[in-house]
Image (cartoon, helix red, strand yellow):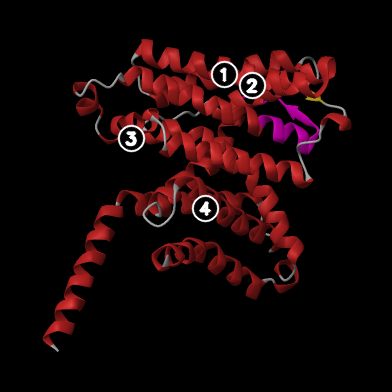
Amino acid sequence: MKKTARHALESISLPIAVYLIFLILIPRRFGNFNCIRTIFMQSIVPTITAYAVAFGNICGLFDFSIGSEQIIAGVVGGTMAAKFGIPGMVIGALLAALIVTAITGTLNSLLKIPSLVLTMGLTMIYEIVGSKLAGHYGFVQIDTKHAIFGSGVNIILIFIFSAVLFYFLFYHTVFSYNLKAVGSNETVAKNSGIPVNLVKFKAFVYGGIFLSISAILTLSQSGSVGAQQSLGSVTIFFKPLISILLALVIQNICNLAAGIFIAQFTLNIIFIGLIAAGLPDTFQNVVLGLFLLLVMILFENTERISAWKEKKAVARRAAQETA
């Protein structure tokens, strides 16, 4: 119990520390409950998008097409909402997300090229598809009566459902064990009889479930979804990627479902703080890039950091025994 409590405190120490820094620097903006609520609500959709990315990321896949796939799901969901209401929006977004992720997974299995190259090419294709589906104006709107999932209790309940579903799929299924095995060493996994291509295909498709949820919530929050071109949708991928990498750094003290949200919450504190400070968008992109580099450094050196901590602990115990 004490260990669990300690890990919980360690997990939330990062967002608390970052929030306190901005509270000192910008007390008017951060010194009220509404600010915390805003940060929390703005962290929900990127967290669910990160859940969609996480399956592929764990087994070594980089899906840059995630943003364009989300847009297609949103456009189809919005179009279906106009004809069949809320059920049409939900079913349309889910089917669209599953279809495009299944296509991506199938091509990844058949073409045998790096997922980074494949999904970058597919991004351009999916953006064109999204533009065509969105029609002449390049965006799809929904009636306010259909936007019931984007605020209040509903979005929180959907977030809790998504987190629990991700936790179950990632920690309590045969697929999850195969996924981690493939990500750890694909050759060994294949020699052990694990169907590597099927695991990777499922990683894309399982991600499609969460992609449809994030598309529905985005559509409900904004009331519309717009098509992107010239790789504009790729930016949707970066914040979820950073939150996943940061969550992997702290996974020894926090499960991935909660860790992704904590990381995303921290990111949003930083960006809302930068906006409140009046810094331009270009500087925000610089901070995002630096933060990504910092997280990558921590992620790539996790074992070294753990070994250093263990060596330090051994030295401390030896000094205590000597004394």
Q: Find the residue positioned furthest to the front.
A: 1
Q: Secondary structure at mark 1?
A: helix
Is tag 3's residue or tag 4's residue first in the polypeptide sequence? 3
Is tag 3's residue or tag 2's residue first in the polypeptide sequence? 2
Q: Which mark is residue 263?
A: 4
* Image location of residue 204, percent across then percent down: 47, 24
Apparent side of residue 125 relative to residue 314 in the rendered image (left or right): right
Disc 3 target residue: 180
Disc 1 target residue: 98
- Residue name at image x 72 percent, y 57 percent: 37
Residue type at mark 4: give it: Ala
- Taking 228 as reference, is 172 above or below it? below
The span picked out in magenta is: 215-230
Q: Find the residue positioned furthest to the top.
A: 110
- Residue name at image x 27 percent, y 22 percent: 194
Q: Secondary structure at mark 2?
A: helix
* Image location of residue 300, percent across then percent down: 31, 49
The answer to whether the residue labelled 1 contacts the one labelled 2, judged by CB atoms less than 8 Å apart, is: yes
- Taking 139 as reference, is 161 above or below it? below
Disc 2 target residue: 94
Q: Label 3 vs label 2: CA separation?
A: 26 Å
Is tag 4's residue or tag 1's residue first in the polypeptide sequence? 1
Q: Label 4 vs label 1: CA separation?
A: 27 Å
Q: Nearer the viewer, mark 2 or mark 4?
A: 2
The residue lying toward the viewer, choosing from 322 and 124, is: 322
Residue type at mark 3: give it: Lys
User: Residue 304 falls in which quadrant of the image?
Assistant: bottom left
